[in-house]
Image: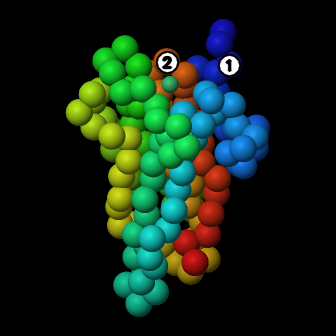
Amino acid sequence: MNALLYGVNRPRSWDPVEMSDAEKKHHVDVDVLSFDEEKQLARVRVEVGKYLKHPNEPSHFIQWIELCVDDTPAVRVDFTASLAHPSVEVLVHATPSSTIFAKARCNLHGTWMSKRISVQ
Ligand SMILES: [Fe+2]
């Protein structure tokens, strides 16, 4: 069994200087662009391959990105090869104490997870 395909992968370090090229290509970057405390809405961007572009062709591409709020899946976006860039910007309900993380799936290299960050 290939652990890369069946587990959830993370880079050995979150510092891009210490990442391998494969880790850079599959790095899942999650960023809170804004948080509206009154509406309890966070605008979040998730991008795969921020440090090194991931291939995007029918034989090798990012299939989906999933964003979790407080460990609960909130948004999942499916991608097709070639036309879609593996990046999304979404609004999710959250509280000031909420934490978020994202996962992304490469058809060849399995599921990769971002850092967990606070919305505020
Ligand atoms: Fe890949």
Residue sitting at 46 percent across and 79 percent down?
35
Could you say where residue 29 lies in the image, as x and y percent from the top left? 54, 51
Could you say where residue 98 lies in the image, as x and y percent from the top left? 58, 71
Q: Which residue lies under the disc numbered 1? A: 3
103 and 62: which is toward the camera: 62
Q: Which residue lies under the disc numbered 2? A: 108
- Give residue 18's quadrant in the image: top right
Mark 1 secondary-structure assignment: helix
Residue type at mark 1 is: Ala
Q: Which mark is residue 98?
A: none
For residue 53, above or below residue 5: below
Residue sitting at 41 percent across and 19 percent down?
60
- Cβ of mark 2 under 8 Å from ligand 1: the answer is yes
Mark 2 secondary-structure assignment: loop
On the picture, is 63 further left or further right than 84?
Answer: right
For the rendered model, the colour scheme is rainbow
Q: Earlier in the sequence, mark 2 or mark 1?
A: 1
